[in-house]
């Protein structure tokens, strides 16, 4: 099973929202589990607990999990930070299949929430995406 946060980061990279795992790490603008000081304009993704997993039995045993992806968009422009967060939210407004055998759906949770400015006066907005993961 691939990491759902990595799958989400790769999806955002594919759609042009930033750079994930660039050959030159200094060019990355999408991060997992951290919001580094540089670059100023970037996206960070954390995977957190969501609803309780559902267990099922039958021909194949499995678990369906619903973790939450917390995404923070930071930018030197408040309007750009807000519009980028909203554009990412809208990617998942009707749900999106990220592919793979186990991560099969992601659905928008919250509208962008303004988190304020960081110590360097860059604007931050947060959105939540509910993931649905089938672990066989």
Image (tube, helix red, strand yellow):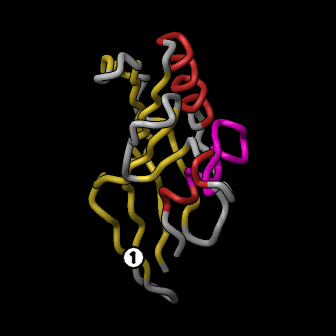
23 or 45, nearer to the observer: 23
94 or 32, nearer to the observer: 32
Residue occupying image coordinates x 65% and y 50%:
11
Q: Residue 48 lies in magenta, yes or no? A: no
The x and y percentages for residue 130 are: 43, 46
Q: Which segment did they paint magenta?
A: 8-21
Mark 1 sits on what residue?
Answer: 56
Q: Residue 14 lies in magenta, yes or no? A: yes
The x and y percentages for residue 121 are: 36, 16
Instruction: Say what secondary structure mark 1 lies in.
Output: strand
Q: Residue furthest bottom?
A: 59
The x and y percentages for residue 93 are: 56, 32
Residue occupying image coordinates x 51% and y 42%:
107
Q: Quadrant of residue 10?
A: bottom right
Q: Residue furthest top?
A: 79
Residue occupying image coordinates x 49% and y 80%:
136
- Count of residue discs: 1
Q: Relative to 64, does residue 50 appear above or below in the rendering?
A: above
State left or right for residue 17 relative to residue 108.
right
State left or right for residue 96 relative to residue 112.
right
Residue occupying image coordinates x 42% and y 32%:
127
Sort mark 1 into few (<14), some (14-19) or many (20+) by Cα contacts within 10 Å: few
């Amino acid at each position: 099973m691939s990491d759902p946060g990595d799958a989400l980061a790769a999806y955002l990279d594919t759609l042009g929202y930033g750079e994930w795992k660039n050959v030159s790490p200094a060019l990355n603008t999408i991060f997992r589990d951290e919001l580094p000081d540089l670059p100023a304009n970037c996206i960070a993704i954390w995977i957190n607990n969501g609803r309780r997993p559902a267990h099922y039995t039958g021909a194949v045993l499995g678990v369906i999990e619903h973790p939450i992806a917390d995404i923070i968009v930071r930018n030197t422009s408040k309007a750009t930070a807000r519009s980028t967060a909203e554009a990412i939210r809208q990617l998942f407004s009707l749900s999106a299949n990220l592919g793979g055998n186990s991560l099969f759906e992601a659905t928008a949770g919250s509208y962008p929430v303004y988190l304020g400015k960081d110590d360097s006066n860059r604007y931050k907005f947060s959105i939540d995406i509910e993931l649905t993961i089938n672990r066989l």
